[in-house]
């Protein structure tokens, strides 16, 4: 399927919670395919990107396409457990690719989800993968990294963060 346009910061659908995904639904395989194509296209054009959530292409369904390791969709993911230990980091997003946001995230999480066939799965994640999954699940809940900014000074242009790193 084709790469889809990514909704940008300010689009009201990005703040809208998503409906549960129904494994086996006809539209679902198309959404998963479009998410994979859109992730690959974004990586090729921008040089970064590890996952994408369905709301970012205008589909308000609880699907994340994870492009880390073996690419796969996560249907109806939710955080079942998270560590009390937190990390602070600069978060980025396809929906505002030139902006970075300083946020706090749990260092370790356990995510339960369904695969594309509806089989229940779980994923234990630490550090970068934990941060990524928290970011993507936030998208499904209508929450953006900008909503999680530590404070008013926790926004910066990507070029400035990279220059100072």
Image (cartoon, grey):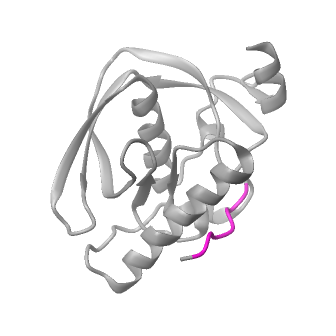
Residue at image x 64%, y 30%? 149
- Looking at the rendering, the stretch of residues picked out in magenta corresponds to 2-8
Give the x, y percent position of residue 45.
73, 52
Asked if residue 117 lies in the magenta stretch, the reply is no
Q: Please say if 107 is above or below 21.
A: above
Quadrant where the image shows the C terminus: top right
Q: Please say if 7 is above or below 142.
A: below
**Left or right: 33 with respect to 73?**
right
Residue at image x 41%, y 32%? 129
**Left or right: 128 with respect to 108?**
right
**Left or right: 88 with respect to 30?**
right
For this orientation, the residue located farthest to the bottom is 26
Give the x, y percent position of residue 12.
67, 63
Residue 15 visible from this viewpoint: no
Residue 85, by quadrant, is top left
> How many marks are shown on the rendered structure?
0
**Pick the front one: 51 or 145:** 51
Residue 58, by quadrant, is bottom right
**Pick the front one: 94 or 86:** 94
SS majority, magenta: loop
Give the x, y percent position of residue 41.
64, 59
Asked if residue 4 lies in the magenta stretch, the reply is yes
Residue at image x 48%, y 47%? 136
Residue at image x 60%, y 39%? 145
Residue 44 visible from this viewpoint: yes
Q: Please say if 55 is above or below 144.
A: below
Q: Please say if 9 is above or below 18.
A: above
Residue 146, by quadrant, is top right
């Amino acid at each position: 399927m084709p790469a889809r346009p990514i909704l940008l910061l300010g689009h009201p659908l990005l703040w809208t919670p998503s409906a549960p995904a129904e494994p086996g639904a006809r539209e679902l395989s198309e959404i998963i395919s479009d998410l994979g194509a859109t992730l690959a296209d974004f990586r090729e054009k921008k040089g970064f990107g590890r996952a994408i959530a369905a709301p970012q292409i205008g589909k308000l369904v609880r699907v994340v396409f994870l492009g880390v390791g073996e690419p796969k969709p996560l249907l109806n993911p939710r955080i079942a457990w998270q560590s009390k230990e937190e990390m602070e980091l600069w978060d980025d997003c396809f929906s505002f690719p030139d902006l970075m946001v300083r946020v706090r995230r749990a260092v370790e999480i356990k995510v339960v989800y369904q695969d594309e066939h509806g089989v229940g799965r779980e994923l234990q994640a630490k550090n970068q993968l934990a941060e990524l999954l928290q970011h993507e699940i936030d998208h499904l809940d209508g929450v953006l990294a900008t909503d999680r900014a530590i404070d008013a000074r926790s926004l910066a242009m990507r070029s400035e963060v990279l220059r100072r790193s």
